[in-house]
Image (tube, grey):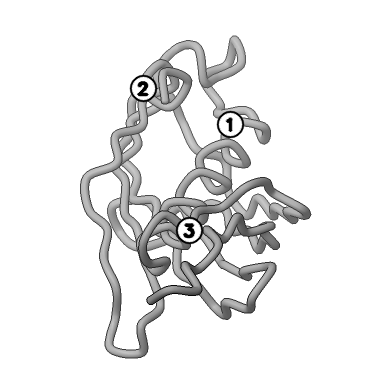
């Protein structure tokens, strides 16, 4: 997604854990576009990255052509200010997947592991119809 790159994000890893739940990871070095004039990353930027990492984690867990269709709900908490030019890790993990929705959590932490922000989200799923002839 072009907006992720423009803000300074780079998704680099994703997979499935031992419980068949997906996860995704990104690196984030906020660019000027992501911050206010004082160099502090805007809350909406946190939300964009956390929404994306949770979506990527869910898609990693889904099989075939099943995918997330839309974000139904997202709640974001900012604990500390993130600053332009600093390095952060963004991680998303699936909590639960049902037939129609999936639940996930995301975090942004600094290089020393301090949490900058976190989010929970509910996502509508698009499921490909199964072929009755299989």
Label at residue 45:
1
| Of callouts 3 and 2, the N-terminal one | 2
Measuring from the top left, give residue 133's x and y in whole percent.
43, 73
At mark 3, the secondary structure is loop
Please identify, in this view, whether the residue under mark 3 or under mark 1 is nearer the observer: 3
Quarter occupied by the C terminus: bottom left
Disc 2 crowd, CA 10 A, few/some/many (<14, 14-19, 20+): some
Task: Give the side of residue 66 with respect to residue 119, left or right.
Answer: left
Residue drawn where x is 34% and y is 58% of the image: 24
- Residue matched to label 2: 5
Residue drawn where x is 49% and y is 59% of the image: 107
- Residue matched to label 3: 66
Q: Toward the viewer: 93 or 81?
A: 93
Judged from this view, the residue extending furthest toward the bottom is 19
Measuring from the top left, give residue 110's x and y in whole percent.
37, 51
Disc 3 crowd, CA 10 A, few/some/many (<14, 14-19, 20+): some
Q: Report how far apart the C-alphas of labels 3 and 2 lie in the structure.
A: 25 Å
Task: Give the side of residue 79 with respect to residue 21, left or right.
Answer: right
At mark 1, the secondary structure is helix
Q: Toward the viewer: 92 or 46?
A: 92
Task: Give the side of residue 123 with respect to residue 67, left or right.
Answer: right
Residue drawn where x is 42% and y is 52% of the image: 56
Residue drawn where x is 50% and y is 74% of the image: 132
């Amino acid at each position: 997604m072009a907006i992720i790159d423009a803000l300074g994000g780079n998704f680099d890893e994703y997979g499935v854990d031992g419980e068949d739940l997906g996860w995704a990871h990104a690196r984030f070095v906020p660019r000027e576009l992501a911050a206010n004039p004082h160099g502090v990353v805007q809350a909406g930027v946190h939300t964009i990255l956390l929404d994306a990492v949770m979506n990527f984690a869910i898609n990693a867990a889904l099989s075939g052509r099943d995918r997330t269709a839309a974000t139904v709900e997202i709640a974001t908490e900012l604990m500390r200010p993130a600053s332009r030019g600093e390095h952060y890790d963004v991680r998303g993990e699936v909590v639960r997947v049902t037939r129609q929705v999936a639940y996930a959590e995301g975090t942004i932490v600094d290089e020393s592991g301090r949490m900058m922000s976190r989010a929970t989200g509910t996502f509508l799923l698009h499921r490909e119809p199964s072929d009755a002839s299989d």
